[in-house]
Amino acid sequence: MKLQIVVRTEILATHQWPNAPEHRKYLASQHSHMFKFRAIASVSHSDRQIEFHDLRLRLMTAVNEIAMHRMDGPAVFKDMSCEQIGEKILKMMPELESVIVSEDGLCDAIITRESNDKHIEGNPRKSSSRVYLASSSKGDRDLLRNVASDLTDRGYMVFAPCLAFVGNETSELRPIIMDVCLTTLVNWAQDLIILDEGIPSIGCNIENNVAIAKGIPVSTIKTKKEN
């Protein structure tokens, strides 16, 4: 018996095809779709090996990191096709077997991982593979993105709040975001890694204290050069 779980999310966004042929020239301009995503993962037993809510949160995190968000309109996928977006999601979520990226539920791209691509050669998945990557909201986002990408390439599943919720840090949403983050840390993460850029962070202090209280291993990547 083969067991699979499926989670879904969607986002209103634009994209374009700069080199569209003449008969589809209208696709060269930015145009919007309701992009719909279905992520499919295989599991080896039927007792919540991967929790739906955790997997959906990671899918939403990946989509939000790939898209460029705006305050005055839909998110932007630039010139990425559905297939290219799906390839990025599979790279960021090594636990997935396949992902479906749809334009308005009418046109779908199905991206399936080849069996020999499941794990990166030379970087076997470890038993402690789910990483919560914490950093200051005032830190270098490009640096954080590079660290997250490196961990993903090494076979880890990564949740990085400062990438997942960028642009949504309003005073009204901040308590809700922190609650989601701490719930993910306690119920999903197997390791907490703090990206230390020498910037004071109340959020990182809270995450550090919660991880210690729950027995979650904590490590630090120092990026600030010592004087």
Image (tube, helix red, strand yellow):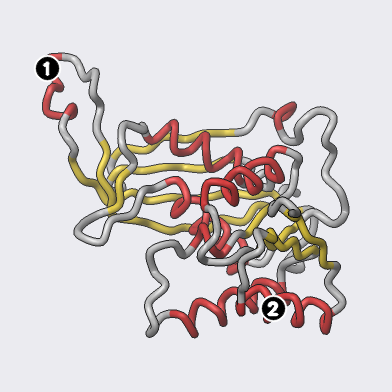
Q: Which mark is residue 41?
A: none
Q: Is residue 57 left or right of residue 26?
A: right
Q: Position of residue 71 (x, y in %)?
A: 25, 61
| Amino acid found under the numbered disc labelled 1 | His
Please say if 192 is above or below 89.
below
Image depth: mark 1 or mark 2 in front: 2
Task: Choose the circle earlier in sequence order: 1 or 2.
Answer: 1
Given residues 99 and 90, the one toward you in this image is 90
- Quarter of the figure with the C terminus: bottom right
Given residues 183 and 170, the one toward you in this image is 170
Q: Which mark is residue 205?
A: 2
Distance, label 1 to label 2, CA atoms, is: 56 Å
Given residues 95 and 61, the one toward you in this image is 61
**Which residue is at a point 51% across and 64% down the rendered structure image?**
138
Please say if 74 is above or below 53.
above
Q: Which residue is mark 1?
A: 23
- SS at mark 2 in the image: helix
**Which residue is at a point 76% across and 65% down the rendered structure image?**
192
**Which residue is at a point 64% across and 78% down the rendered structure image?**
183
- SS at mark 1 in the image: helix
Given residues 136 and 127, the one toward you in this image is 136
| Amino acid found under the numbered disc labelled 2 | Asn
Neighbour tally class for label 2: few under 14, some 14-19, many 20 plus, Cα within 10 Å: some
